[in-house]
Amino acid sequence: MEKLNRYIIGANASIFQKIDPETNVEVFMPRNDIELKMAIDFAKENDLPITSKGGGSGMSGACTGASREKVVISSMRLKKIHELNFEEGYVVVEPGLTPDELNYEIQQVKPNWKFFVAPSSRDIATLGGIISTDGGGNDAWLAGTMVDNIQEVEFFDYDNNLIVVEKIDNDVNKAKITCSDRKLEKQLKEKDFTLLDIAGSHGVLGFISKIKVDIKPLPEAGKENYAVIHANNLNNFGKIIYELIELDIPLTYGETIVEARHPDISGETHPPMFILKYPTEFDGKIKDICENIENADFTSIDLKKFERMADIRVKMAKRNPPEGFQMALFEGYGIYGKNLLRYEEIITKINDTLRKYTFEPFIKFGHAPSVYYEDNKKIKGIIMHSREKRPEELTPKIVFDAIVDLVSACEEFGVTPKPEHKWPYSKNTMKHKRLVELTEVLGKKFNPFLLDCKLDELADLVL
């Protein structure tokens, strides 16, 4: 059973799936803070690094801990709701709850309330994992990413110091820091430590034990329209996104299918296409956008068809080709600004690069318009994900040569390659430098491989 736990705990949705159970020296699944602190004490007594594990639905490979000896601490049993406050609009929860689980509990009390962060993996991804990746989803355009929906985070460092980071004035760049170690508290204050540092840190700062998240009422029913928009080419498709952002249209749901080479998907959706839900009063503005873009086809649809289209989009990543298998080689392209007006050129370059390494483009989809943070700046654009047909003769060298080339292509076009599973290429980013600086203060013992990994080490994890 112990060895089985070591295998299971390494499972994740990234391309890094080769698990060596012997390097997971000990696996802990704490049920409360006391058991969590005991797990951290075990790691410290044995001088082992710690890897935090949520639902394993992320595409980064961060939760694998690589093939280094380590202690793995899972949040799967940390699912308690400590406080549910509708008057002030927040809930205090443990990190192992998923958004779907949280919303189920909220709606048992108030059916018209919700937690508004909905990544595609919201039935699997944990709240702790979502803040660690600063996930978003189709609500992010209006609600923001995870960090925008958090008021407070509690976490433990390697010395079992409890650190509380509280947002001030609803500003992600301002925080009140409280720590059981006054010296460490002073150091973190001097570093201007905020929730934005925790967001997207991938577990290198400590183990998150509690999160205070925002909850809000749902929009009033009966005042929303549904539509699909088709474009005849990708530049016109990008122009639609650009205009929606420029006019700041408050879409309550915006999803895209950029490319689809599965017959069950392409036949019904005819990409590139948008699936939209929006307040009724913006119907005229959205139609005007389409009328001013050549061959942009706007069609109003009813709720039943909207739900069918949305279901197709959400399940796209789970569809394998009729022959062979798909994989997520390079997850997360942030395309924004005037680059949206040359979408065709960008997608052509990405696809040419994939084919150079014998990956065949299969599906591309995304949240749009959406938002994400690049360092401490909020970017408005599309977050596009892709899946490729896995080459028959896949080797680690093919994978990493392709990733290197894709990163270069993104830099050439000014596209933001979200760095999660391309760790060796993120070392020149401000985020990487900031995390290195903070881990110097916090002990450098949580997921250290993410900040100093090498290509060969990652390559060994590719099946």
Image (cartoon, helix red, strand yellow):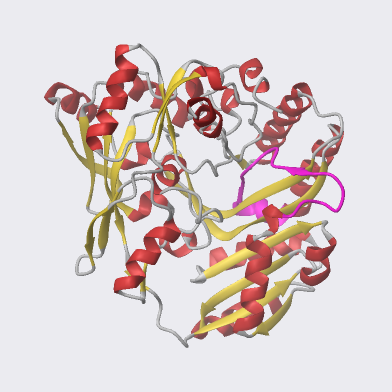
Is 44 part of what is drawn in magenta?
no
Q: Is residue 391 left or right of residue 133?
A: right
Residue at image position (52%, 40%) is 56
Is 341 part of what is drawn in magenta?
yes
* Residue farthest along the left direction in this orientation: 182
Q: Which residues are magenta?
A: 319-342
* Residue farthest along the bottom direction in this orientation: 222
User: Looking at the image, which is closer to me, 111 or 236?
Assistant: 111
Q: Is residue 233 left or right of residue 111?
A: right
User: Which image quadrant is residue 19 in?
Assistant: top right
| Residue 453 screen position, x and y as percent | 55, 18
User: Looking at the image, which is closer to me, 29 or 198?
Assistant: 29
418 versus 188 height, above or below: below
Residue at image position (62%, 37%) is 14
User: Which image quadrant is residue 32 in?
Assistant: top left
| Residue 430 screen position, x and y as percent | 46, 30
